[in-house]
Amino acid sequence: MKVDISSVIGMVIAVLIVFGLMGHNLHMFGSMHALIVVVGGLIASTFIKFNITDVMNTMGIVSKIFTNPQDHPKEIIEQIINCANIARKDGMLALEKVQIQNPVLQTAITLCVDGVDPVYLREMMSKEKEYMEIRHHVGVVMFESMGEAGPAMGMVGTLIGMVELLANLSNPDAIGPAMSVALLATMYGAIVANLIVIPFGIKLHHYSTHEGIIYELVMDGVQGIQRGVNPRILEKALVSALSRGQRASIG
């Protein structure tokens, strides 16, 4: 399991900026009422929009924000070329003994060893990729929805604070706390939306795209192995998915 260093750096910087700007007056920026309105409203809105299974599944993949379990396309290409060399030298059945960590490539190689037709193999893997994208789309949409709901819930908290303020104009001591709740609710909504849920949704979308690339590489690579394409030619075809700098390090 690889730690996604960019997510860690981003969250650390966000925390330092937010708490650094608050300075020594941290207690002034705490309001349980505003927090309940924003976070509670966000959770309620999410459960209303999505079924409980989707919510639980999406919350379960939040760990992917900080840990990247996926292989880099360069690593997948190297494994495919290794399998191609083995198949070319020792035959297709020799791939049965090859230990492959990536589950997508392992599935494709197993189908290959079982003698599945190349066209049918691509159809199977394409359908699996399609279902994967559908599942991931639900999670991305959920975080996007939460990103929209965060500022909206902050506005609700602001309106509640303004109502309390206007209702207590005759009491100067109550005006300050009511205004504080109103402003803090807006701040909480903006922070939750722009530093947490929206970035999380974008990161999950990025991971989904990355996994889609892995599927395409595996399908192209395994079909090449099945058709007996020369490993060197197959490698040149697959590295088109990489940047020029990454292509030079293959091998």
Image (cartoon, helix red, strand yellow):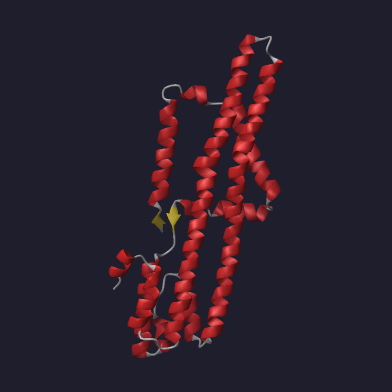
Q: Look at the picture and state if 215 lies above or below 122.
A: above
The image position of residue 215, as x and y in percent, is 49, 71
Q: Look at the picture and state if 32 lies above or below 233.
A: above
The image position of residue 198, as x and y in percent, is 53, 46
Quadrant position of residue 148: top right
Q: Look at the picture and state if 137 lies above or below 13.
A: below
Quadrant position of residue 23: top left
Q: Look at the picture and state if 195 lies above or below 110.
A: above
The image position of residue 173, as x and y in percent, is 61, 11
Q: Camera-side residue: 55 or 245?
A: 245
Q: Residue at x 42, y 48 (%)?
A: 7
Q: Is residue 10 left or right of residue 44?
A: left
Q: Residue at x 42, y 70 (%)?
A: 101
Quadrant housing the N terminus: bottom left
Quadrant housing the C terminus: bottom left
Q: Camera-side residue: 188 or 39?
A: 188
Q: How many marks do you count on the picture?
A: 0
Q: Residue at x 35, y 82 (%)?
A: 233
Q: Residue at x 36, y 69 (%)?
A: 75
